[in-house]
Image (spheres, grey):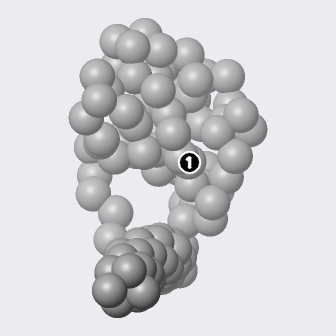
């Protein structure tokens, strides 16, 4: 009887372990899909990924002064009419926003597609 009880406990443990292992395997695949969508959007709108630290000082200053505590989490750049236009993913008090700005720190209202 002890062997039957141990066998049932071992089977239940294996079942629970396999469920956890399957749940953990699904997360990276989900992240890969999100990254693939972002890369596809990058190609679609001709903006190229840029390190946030490489933004011009005028852009950094505009984010700090005009967006009151916003943090640029991601940045992209596109050349248009001989000038650089930056697309920023901002975190404003926990809320995600996209904004467009030129290299001189002037916000652009126009939506890019």
Residue 63 image offset from top left, x and y in percent: 46, 22
For label 1, the crowd category at 10 Å Cα-Cα, with few meaning under 14, some 14 to 19 and many 20 or more, is: many
In front: 53, or 34?
A: 34
Q: Secondary structure at mark 1?
A: strand
Q: Which residue does the image show at 64% across and 39% down from the upper left?
A: 52
Q: Is residue 1 above or below residue 81?
A: below
The reply to whether residue 85 is in sight is yes
Q: Is residue 108 above or below residue 82?
A: above
Q: Which residue does the image show at 42% across and 86% down from the upper left?
A: 3
Q: Is residue 109 left or right of residue 29?
A: left
In which quadrant is the C terminus drawn?
Answer: bottom left
Q: Which residue does the image show at 40% across and 22% down from the upper left?
A: 70
Residue furthest right as drawn:
54
Question: Based on the displayed image, in which of its 4 quarters is residue 10 positioned?
Answer: bottom left
Residue 112 image offset from top left, x and y in percent: 34, 63
Residue 105 image offset from top left, x and y in percent: 51, 27
Residue furthest front as drawn:
1
- Mark 1 highlights which residue? 75
In front: 106, or 57?
A: 57
């Amino acid at each position: 009887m002890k062997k039957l009880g141990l066998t049932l406990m071992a089977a239940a443990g294996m079942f629970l372990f396999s469920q956890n292992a399957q749940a953990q395997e699904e997360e990276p695949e989900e992240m890969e899909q999100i990254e693939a969508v972002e890369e596809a959007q990058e190609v679609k709108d001709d903006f190229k990924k840029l390190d946030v630290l490489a933004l011009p000082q005028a852009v950094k200053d505009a984010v700090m002064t005009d967006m009151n505590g916003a943090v640029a989490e991601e940045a992209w750049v596109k050349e248009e009419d001989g000038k650089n236009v930056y697309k920023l993913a901002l975190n404003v008090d926990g809320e995600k926003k996209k904004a467009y700005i030129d290299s001189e720190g002037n916000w652009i209202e126009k939506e890019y597609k």
